[in-house]
Amino acid sequence: MADLAEPLHRVKARAAKIRLAAFDVDGVLTDGSLILGDRGEQFKVFHTHDGQGLTMLREAGLHIAVISGRSSAAVEERMADLGIRYVYQGASDKLSIFNALLRELGLSAEQAAFMGDDVPDLPVMIRAGLAVAVADAHYLVCQHAHWRTRHPGGCGAVRELCELLLDAQGALANLYDRYLR
């Protein structure tokens, strides 16, 4: 079970309102390792379970965004493969991007979740209606999270949040039913 900063019923009440799920990349969608090749190229490892969770969120009609302080062609490619439209890289001010995205989508902060792992994520987490920390997040991030995953970043933590959101909104069982036919 995930660590809770709030009682589960309150976390689920927050999750039921979410229309936008936004994620940091390094340390959330990846394990935070920076793998550099001899020619300076960057390599990132993404977990397929996280990708399936994001696909299910998209299929359920939720907006998905990534807001990363770093820029990487691998992130651009992976997000395109998953059909994720809102990809912001090289973001020195994640909160400004988050606020602009809320305005563009016509959403309130209460309708947005953000998953982070380190202190640059705190301004967005403090504003979001549902702030989520991965299991191995920095202690300050954990202190400001409404919910904390069991899995560390890059190892299925994103899938946990996706399933929480879908379950709270009554969509998870229907999405899984199609695989059981």
Image: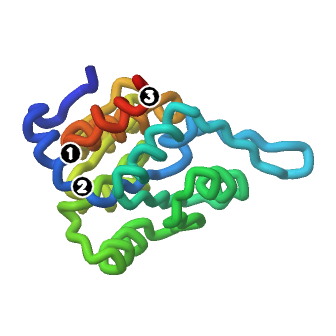
- For label 3, the SS is loop
> Mark 1 sits on what residue?
169
Q: Residue furthest top?
A: 1
Name the mark nearer the viewer: 3 or 1: 3
Residue 101 to residue 39: above or below: below
What crowding class fits label 2: few (fewer than 14 Cα within 10 Å), some (14-19), or many (20 or more)?
A: many
- Comes first in the chain, label 3 or label 2: 2
Circle 1: residue type = Gln
Residue 28 location in percent, x, y?
Answer: 48, 41
Using the image as rendered, state which of residue 74 and residue 40 is in the foreground.
74
The residue positioned 30% from the left and 36% from the top of the image is 174
Q: Residue furthest right?
A: 39
Residue 95 location in percent, x, y?
Answer: 37, 68
Q: Is residue 157 left or right of residue 51?
A: left
Circle 2: residue type = Ile
Labelled disc at residue 18: 2
Q: Is residue 74 left or right of residue 67?
A: right
Using the image as rendered, state which of residue 121 and residue 155 is in the foreground.
155
> Mark 3 sits on what residue?
179
Q: Quadrant of residue 96?
A: bottom left
Circle 3: residue type = Tyr
The residue positioned 59% from the left and 66% from the top of the image is 90
Name the mark nearer the viewer: 3 or 2: 3
The C terminus sits in image quarter: top left
- Comes first in the chain, label 3 or label 1: 1
Residue 53 to residue 94: above or below: above
